[in-house]
Amino acid sequence: MLNNFKIVLLFPLFLLSVSSAENLIQNDLNNSVYADSIKEPNSRFWGIGAVIGAPASVSLTAGIYLAPVSFRVTGGVWGKGWYGLQGDIAFPLTKSKELIQNVSVIGGLFASKVIDIDPSQPGIQITLYNKQNYIGLAYDVYYASFLMQTGLGFGHGDFSNPQFLFQFGYLFDFIF
């Protein structure tokens, strides 16, 4: 009986100590260096990184993210056989400390080398480039430094329209 009485008396003290510990941890987080590095919804920052997808399979990307609009350039070269460049102007739909969702106007070009063999002339190879210039719309999500973009591009060149364009990658961000 005495043990049950001790538990009843000590339980409120336990709850009080847990609540105090949570407050101390929250205060430490709010005053930490990490709290200063979290992007505010209206913050401006540079982003530099790499993406997989359009315009050149594996591309480098760099952009500046401002409060009302963002600009980004993505491009890559894989020897003489594959290259591409894309520019984005993005308008935010939602912005929070870790998540930014944009609608982007995109434009770019890509090309790939094709080696063709003429059956009427054995041993002779013909090198051609399939090229495409495009403009279009895309939806991007930037979450905790990860970037994903998907959209459609329309243009002229050797590929059919519309072009499905996709990027996924990681950006290092620098707040200014």
Image (cartoon, rainbow, N blue to C red):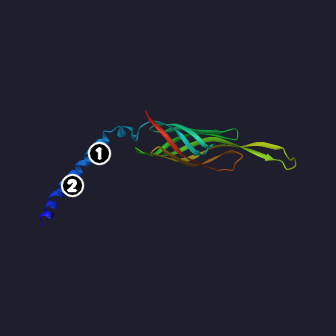
According to the picture, the residue beneath numbered tag 2 turns out to be 15
Query: In this picture, is 5 found above or below 104?
Result: below
Q: Tell me the residue at 25%/48% (across/down).
A: 21
Q: How many marks?
A: 2
Nearer the viewer's eye, disc 1 or disc 2?
2
Task: Work out whether 16 lies above or below 70.
Answer: below
Q: Residue furthest top?
A: 176
Q: Nearer the viewer, residue 87 or 115?
A: 115
**x and y percentages locating residue 106 in the rendered image:** 58, 42
Rendered image quadrant of residue 135: top right
The amino acid on which the numbered mark 1 sits, given as a three-letter code, is Gln
Which residue carries the number 1 mark? 26
Sequence-wise, which precedes: disc 1 or disc 2?
Answer: 2
SS assignment at label 2: helix
For this orientation, the residue located farthest to the right is 120
Q: Residue 101: percent from the left, percent from the top?
A: 47, 47
The picture quadrant where one finds residue 109 is top right
Give the CA distance from mark 1 to mark 2.
Answer: 17 Å
Q: Residues within 10 Å of mark 2 (few under 14, many from 20)?
A: few
Q: Residue at x 79, y 46 (%)?
A: 116
**Residue contact at pointers 1 and 2, CB within 8 angstroms:** no
Q: Position of residue 47 (x, y in %)?
A: 49, 38
| Residue at x 21% of width, y 51% of height | 17
Q: Is residue 37 left or right of residue 9?
A: right
**Amino acid carrying mark 2 in the image:** Leu
Q: Could you say which disc has been placed on residue 77 in the image?
A: none
Task: Say which quadrant the N terminus sits in.
Answer: bottom left
Left or right of 7, for residue 141: right
